[in-house]
Image (cartoon, rainbow, N blue to C red):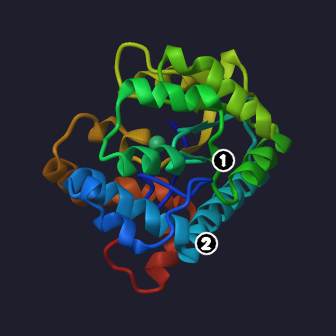
Amino acid sequence: MRHSLIILIAAAFFTGCITVKNNQLVTNSANNNTIVGGKLFTAVWQQRAAEYKALCEQAYNIATLRVQQYYNADTSSKAKAIVTDIDETFLNNAPYAVHQALQGKDFSSASWSEWTSRADADTLAGALAFFKFAASKGMTIFYVTNRNEADRQGTLKNLQKFGFPNADNEHLWLMDKTSSKEERRQKIAKDYDIVLLLGDNLGDFSALFDKKSEAERSENVLNNKRRIRAAFHRSSESELRRLGRCDV
Ligand SMILES: [Mg+2]
């Protein structure tokens, strides 16, 4: 599978129309739970940090450059695809996270479905322009997500509201039997050259990270530096060496 990958930094929970007024909110007794409070802290940072928005823009700027490089060098007649995750890769679910946290609650399927059915998630900085650019270069967008069938209509409505390319049933690949995305990636690769994988979770890129412990995931990153680097910066390996990075 020929592709690069673009990882959005951080991304458990993001900014949105529900704002947290100040840091005192995270000391509220409802948020003493480590998981819930931790998510709320994350959401506060993502709501407030200009650096976070800049990181999103940077990720999508790199993705745009990669698409242009691929387009310029491509000589294959095979169709081209971008395979992307949805949540926290380009849709921002911070309002849901904050809403749950302020009630002292973690994720639940029922509340999540209620949120997705509203089709109210905003986009992350730089995302929509990138996908429109890729489509303008003849690339087909596949939305490979672990949202489930119950979320289909709300998800399509959310994507269509912003005019995302290929926002239809054919290109929305929801979770079926397994949360692993490997089988879905392989199916797409039969008919398309996958130009980019985009995601906020390493499982969006490789089965190496499916259902692994925190320690195993970190170990897999360290043990596969070459493979990950090759996917991430395929065209820049020689340049990194020239700059003295002997580890590449
Ligand atoms: Mg995600």
- Which residue occupies 34% across, 55% down? 39
SS at mark 1?
Answer: strand
The answer to whether residue 146 of the structure is visible from this angle is no
Q: Looking at the picture, tell me which residue is in the foreground, 77 or 125.
A: 125
Which one is nearer the viewer's eye here, 62 or 23? 23
Q: Give x and y (percent) for residue 98.
A: 45, 51
Point out the tag, 2 or 1, that comes first from the N-terminus: 2
**Quarter of the image that includes the C terminus:** bottom left
Q: Is mark 1 within 8 Å of ligand 1?
A: no
Q: Is residue 195 above or below residue 112?
A: below
What distance separates the C-alpha of mark 2 from that of mark 1? 16 Å
Quarter of the view holding residue 50: bottom right
Q: Residue at x 73, y 45 (%)?
A: 131
For badge 2, the amino acid type reads Ala
- Residue 62: image x %, image y %? 63, 63
For numbered disc 2, what is the local secondary structure?
helix
Mark identifier at residue 122: 1
State the mark number for residue 29.
none
Dot 1 surroundings within 10 Å: few (below 14), some, or many (20 or more)?
A: many
Q: Amino acid at mark 1?
A: Asp
Q: Residue placed at 77% from the left, 31% from the top?
A: 160
Residue 98 in view in this figure: yes
Rendering coords of residue 126 (x, y %): 70, 59
- Specify whether 94 is left or right of 142: left
**Where is mark 2, residue-wise?**
54
Query: Looking at the image, do the residues carrying marks 2 and 1 touch, with CB atoms under 8 Å apart?
Result: no
